Structures are given as C-alpha cells and as structure tokens.
Amino acid sequence: MRHLTVLILSILSIHFSYSQINEIGIFAGGSNFIGDVGATDYISPNQLAIGGIYKWNRSKRHSYRASVIFSELKGIDTKSDDPRRIQRGYEFSSKIIEISLGIEFTFLDFDLHSGDKVATPYLYTGISTAKHDNHYFLNGVQTQENTSSWAFGIPMVVGFKASFIDNIILGIEVGARYTFSDGLDGSLPDVPSRQQQYKFGNINNNDWYMFSGLTLTYTFGENPCYCPGN
C-alpha cells in the first residue's frame, strides 16, 4: 500500500510540474481574406497581423493555447484571377480583433527540460471569434454601418516549432479560419432591411481568412521531477 501511495504521489508530482510550464510571446505575420470580394488564394498575406500568444504545456505532446491577434482584412477584385470579379471592381477593408482558444498537438515529444534542442511539427485547433465593423456596397463603394459584429469560427493551423536560445521557442505557422459568417466582406449586410437589396456573391459559402507568420515565445515554470517519492 505504501509503495502504491508513493507511486501515485510521484505521478501527481510529474503531472503538477508539467502544468507549471508556460509560454508567452508574440505572433507576427500577415493576413489574407477568402470570400466574395478579392482574390481567393489560400496563402497570400497582404496585410500585417500581430498579436500575443500564451500556452500552458499540459504534457510533452499537447498544450492549451490562447491568442489575441490584430489585423486588417482586405479584398480587391482587381487582384483576383476571376474575370467577373475584375470587371466588377469591388474593394473592401475591415480591421479585426481575433480571440482564439484551443489545443495544440505536437507530432513529437516536445520536452523543454531535456537539455537538448527539440523541434516538432504541430497542429492547432479550437474556436475563434473576430470582431469586425459592418459595411455594405452602395453603387459599388464600401459603405460603413455604425455597428460591429463578432464572427465565430474554427482555426485550423499547421506549424513547426523549435527551441532556439535558452528559454526561447521559435515557430512558423499557417492557419486558416473558417467562420460562421458571410458578412466580413459586406456581401451580406448586417441590417436585415438591406440584405435583400445589397447582398451578392455565393450565399452558400461562408467567409475564410488566413494568418501566416512567426511565433516567438518565452517559456518559464518549474522543471518536472521524475524522482519517485519527491
């Protein structure tokens, strides 16, 4: 019984120690929009995206992650490969603030206390919400509403990260956000009375946007102990 108690306490000690491993840092890169206005290239950043990121490393293979990213979504029909969009000539821009929460999974063990340089590909998903100003197109010109909305979505991110210098982790990632909104580009006005008159595009497809860039995080917290009885 005593040996079982020691084993349980040892496991809890390892679990607790890992739960103290934190990362905090920045994301810097670019954004691009995929919807009813502008180009439909999946990875084609055209606006600056910057924000903060926090991770709680639950184990060597997964982390809980939160981020806040500021950017501007921009769509220009003349940059599209679609002749119909080029002829239409619409253009919009909308500042967004995105909050995202979820789980990051690594393909390989990412033990920050092994003493060795470590690196691994990873995936991230969860839920996101982006605050954006509402607008519509009047005679082909973007016209602002006096309202804003939150567009909820699902982030789908693939990346690669590696220990860099001391407690610094460097990562590179590309992430798509599928949203449950079709109004980020103004193709579906927020005001119901304007929707029938001013809506356009494919109403069966919701909006997407992409973030591509680098993460630089500082890791801190207690080292895990694998010593039974500690």
Image: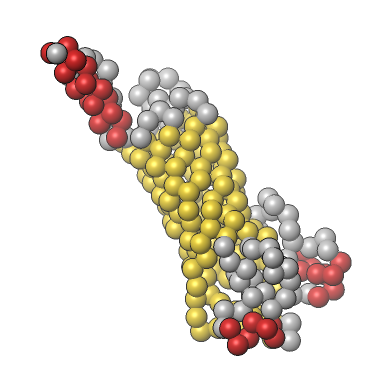
Instruction: Where is residue 6? Give x, y as percent.
Output: 17, 16
Query: Where does the C terminus fall, quadrant-wise?
Result: top left
The image shows residue 44, relative to residue 131, as above or below, that is above
What residue is shown at x 52% (from left), y 29% (from top)?
107
What residue is shown at x 58% (from left), y 40% (from top)?
158
Q: How many marks are shown on the rendered structure?
A: 0
Instruction: Where is residue 50? Give x, y as percent.
Output: 50, 55
The image quarter in which residue 187 lies: bottom right
The image quarter in which residue 45 lies: bottom right
The image shows residue 213, relative to residue 128, as above or below, that is above
Position of 56 compared to 155: left or right? left
The answer to whether residue 14 is visible is yes
The image quarter in which residue 32 lies: bottom right
Instruction: Where is residue 176? Give x, y as percent.
Output: 60, 51
Residue in the foreground of this view, choosing between 120 and 35: 35
What residue is shown at x 43% (from left), y 34% (from top)?
62
Furthest residue in direction front, as rendered: 1
Query: Where does the N terminus fall, quadrant-wise?
Result: top left
What residue is shown at x 22% (from left), y 25% (from top)?
13
Q: How is the image coloured?
A: secondary structure
Position of 86 compared to 171: left or right? right
Instruction: Where is residue 99? Give x, y as percent.
Output: 44, 58
The answer to whether residue 53 is visible is no
Furthest residue in direction left, as rendered: 2
Residue in the foreground of this view, choosing between 83 and 194: 194
